[in-house]
Image (spheres, rainbow, N blue to C red):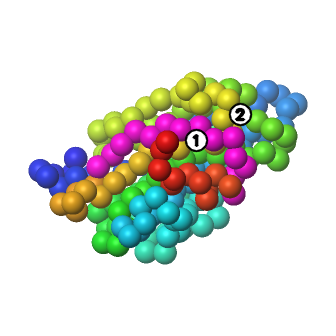
Amino acid sequence: MSGIGKGLGTVEVALRWDPSPLGSPAHDLDLVAGVYPAAARYGPPAYSVYFDRRSPEGTISLNRDSRTGQGLGYDEVMTIDLGRMPEGHARVVVGVVIQQTAGPLVFGDVADPGIRIREGYTELSRHGFAEVAGARAATVAEFVRGASGAWEFRADIRGFTLDPDAFIAAMGASPA
């Protein structure tokens, strides 16, 4: 937490995966965030942030974008500054999509995918994608503004078999 009763401040969502086998098409995973207004927390997003977009007020940035998973450590990193999020925004959902350019892929086809969510040095969540191995996309986190205005983290692991564009439209729907 960023202070007594203040809720979360700046969080980092980091995604990693190992490159595809030599001679195989590259696996391209992407972080995506949807920001939802207080008036429609489960409606369409006010906006989405992913590899070629950013938040209009500068509160969400994608610091690293990998198309192959090559390199050490985390391949994609998204920073969300909840402390500066405008009052009208009440929910942020973060997900991961697998680009389907090399044919149909699911998380079970990708070597060693993992996600880490933290605020400063405090780890909020770390996991692989075993529970959604048959999915093409998944939500991985939800940040919700409470009645006091403080932001809270909720683990939100849900798999989807949608293509990337359809996933972005559906990722903020209320869990069944």
Residue 57: quarter of image: bottom left
Q: Residue at x 32, y 68 (%)?
A: 84
Region of the chain picked out in magenta, as a range: 152-165
The reply to whether residue 21 is visible in this rendering is: yes
| Residue nearer the viewer, 170 or 155 | 170
Of the numbered discs in the image, which one, if any, rests on residue 129?
A: none
The reply to whether residue 9 is visible in this rendering is: no
Of the numbered discs in the image, which one, if any, rests on residue 138?
A: 1
Residue 125: image location, x then y, percent: 39, 35
Q: Residue 34 lies in magenta, yes or no?
A: no
Residue 160: image location, x then y, percent: 63, 41
Residue 174: image location, x then y, percent: 47, 50
* Residue found at the very far front of the displayed protein: 176
The amino acid type of the residue labelled 2 equals: Val
* Residue found at the very far left of the displayed protein: 4
The residue singled out by tag 2 in the image is: 106
Q: Earlier in the sequence, mark 2 or mark 1?
A: 2
In this rendering, position of residue 132 left or right of residue 108: left
Q: Residue at x 29, y 63 (%)?
A: 83
Q: Residue 163 lies in magenta, yes or no?
A: yes
Query: How packed is label 2: few (under 14 Cα within 10 Å), some, or many (20 or more)?
Result: many
Q: Residue at x 46, y 58 (%)?
A: 42
